[in-house]
Image: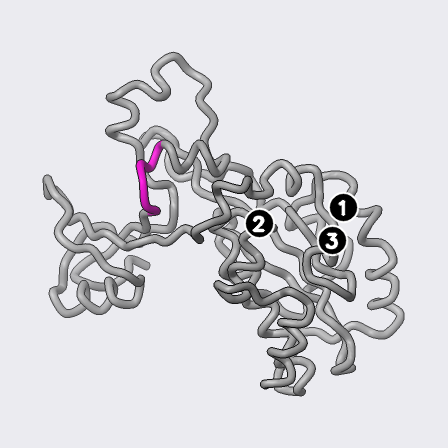
Amino acid sequence: MAGGVRRTRDRDAFAATGVMGAYSTILPADAVRDAASSVYAEIAHRLGWLELDRALSEAEYQQLSASISGWVSQDRTLPEVIETFGPPSLWIGGTNPFYPKTLAYTTADHDHDLICFHLWNAFANAAAETGLRGVRPDPVVLAVRHRPGKFPGSFSFTPEGLNRRPTADQRSPLRSTVWIFHGDRARYASGVFDTLDAGLAWAAERQVTGILAEYAGGGAYDVAVSEGRFTPSKAHHGTSDHVAAFSPGLRHIHLTGGHRDS
């Protein structure tokens, strides 16, 4: 593993804040975690530890490598990735279409790098009666990591990816989040946790019913606008009442008696 980490450092894929720090200059904050996992998966692949869901043939791998730059010259979605290149060798992240994820393609040859498609979506802020929906109907490709050499130059971006690439003030420090529990019919939140696992453990112990939701530091409205998850388009958007009632729009889990709703 040490050799893999050294190679990662040599490629500038390991910043002072780790691989996530390197990715924070490439992708929106909420897409960084799954994307960073692809670097560690690549190390595992080189060491022969990674179990692939599908191994590409040499011809498929070379064709994919050759077509990426032109393919991402326009915006692409998750269904287009699957339709064009088939099921991935490795799927990183959940299947919920409202969350970011990374799809990686490679062969059984441990000398081959992973070709990684980094996709993004997020919950849109919507009126309660309209139900949950994403900023986009399907996750969109922001960048593909496919070139050898130094990490910053190994990506090709879609137009959407260039548009959502973090500005300097969004890159540092890396955005941290907390998980807040709000009980059904409760006026105030009743729990704050550093991690999802800590929140779920507490909820199970206390058998509480409500919502465990992820919040970024700062005002939910301001964070959503800065990250492109919400675009003000009506007269009341950004008013005090609208800002005060704005939801975080990140991950959230419904709990009944301390257990996830099915």
Q: Secondary structure at mark 3?
A: helix
The crowding category of the residue bearing disc 3, from other C-alpha atoms within 10 Å (few below 14, some 14 to 19, many at least 20), is few
Q: Report the residue marked by disc 3.
A: 83
The amino acid sitting under disc 1 is: Val
| Residue 191: quadrant of the picture | bottom left
Residue 214 belongs to the span the image colors magenta: no
- Residue range in magenta is 216-221
Q: Position of residue 237 (x, y in %)?
A: 37, 20
* 124 with respect to 113 (left or right): left
Pair 3/2: label in front = 2
For disc 2, the neighbor class at 10 Å (few under 14, some 14 to 19, many from 20) is many
Q: Which residue is mark 2?
A: 27
Seen at 18% across and 63% down, the residue is: 203
Q: Residue at x 62, y 36 (%)?
A: 163
Q: Which residue is mark 1?
A: 72
Q: Are marks 3 and 2 in contact (CB under 8 Å)?
A: no
Judged from this view, the residue extending furthest toward the top is 235
Q: How far is mark 2 from mark 1, CA to CA?
A: 15 Å
Q: Nearer the viewer, mark 3 or mark 1?
A: 1
Q: Is residue 156 left or right of residue 138?
A: right
Which quadrant would the N terminus be assigned to in this image? bottom right
